Image: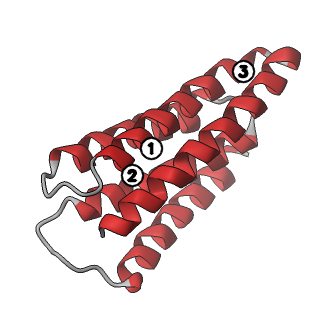
Amino acid sequence: MKEAKLTIGIISIVLSLIIFLQSGISFIYYSGGLFGYIISFCFLIAGIIGIVTHKSNEKNGSYIAAVIFAIGTFVGFFYAGDFFIFKLWALVSSVFGIIFYMTSSTRQQFNIKDIISISGFAIVIFMFYIFTNY
């Protein structure tokens, strides 16, 4: 799972730049873009932690990255307001956080079925949230 942590770390840094630009555009027109900056910062910090600790056998780096992704998820779901794209980034943050949490577990091998089932569960929760709030 070391490759997964490295890959997700790189992807989250690239996504943090995209989220940062989207937040800047939405901040110009609306005041809700401020929380996008917080989500972007969470993606950036967790991505850096994921890259730095991807070779380590310690669980602390994965736990910290998972907690930072969870903070990004919380901000995206509860403070993004009417911005659907920030809620979508919160879903991505939750999936990344779950994967980092799974890599910190005592099990050494994970199947693609594990990742798909956790991602599917996160998508179902996201869809339930969207349909109950609109």
Q: Quadrant of residue 38?
A: top right
> Mark 3 touching mark 2, by CB under 8 A?
no
Q: Quadrant of residue 68?
A: top left
- Residue assigned mark 1: 47
Mark 3 residue type: Gly
Disc sitting over residue 32 in the figure: 3
State which mark lies toward you, 1 or 3. 1
Q: Viewed as shown, does residue 24 lie left or right of 37?
A: right
Q: Is residue 4 above or below residue 79?
A: below
Mark 3 to mark 2: distance in Å? 24 Å
Mark 1 to mark 3: distance in Å? 24 Å
Q: Viewed as shown, does residue 101 lie left or right of 42?
A: left
- Coordinates of residue 19 in the picture (x, y in percent): 68, 37
Q: Earlier in the sequence, mark 3 or mark 2?
A: 3
Q: Can residue 82 be seen in this snapshot?
A: no
- Coordinates of residue 41 in the picture (x, y in percent): 52, 28
Mark 1 residue type: Gly
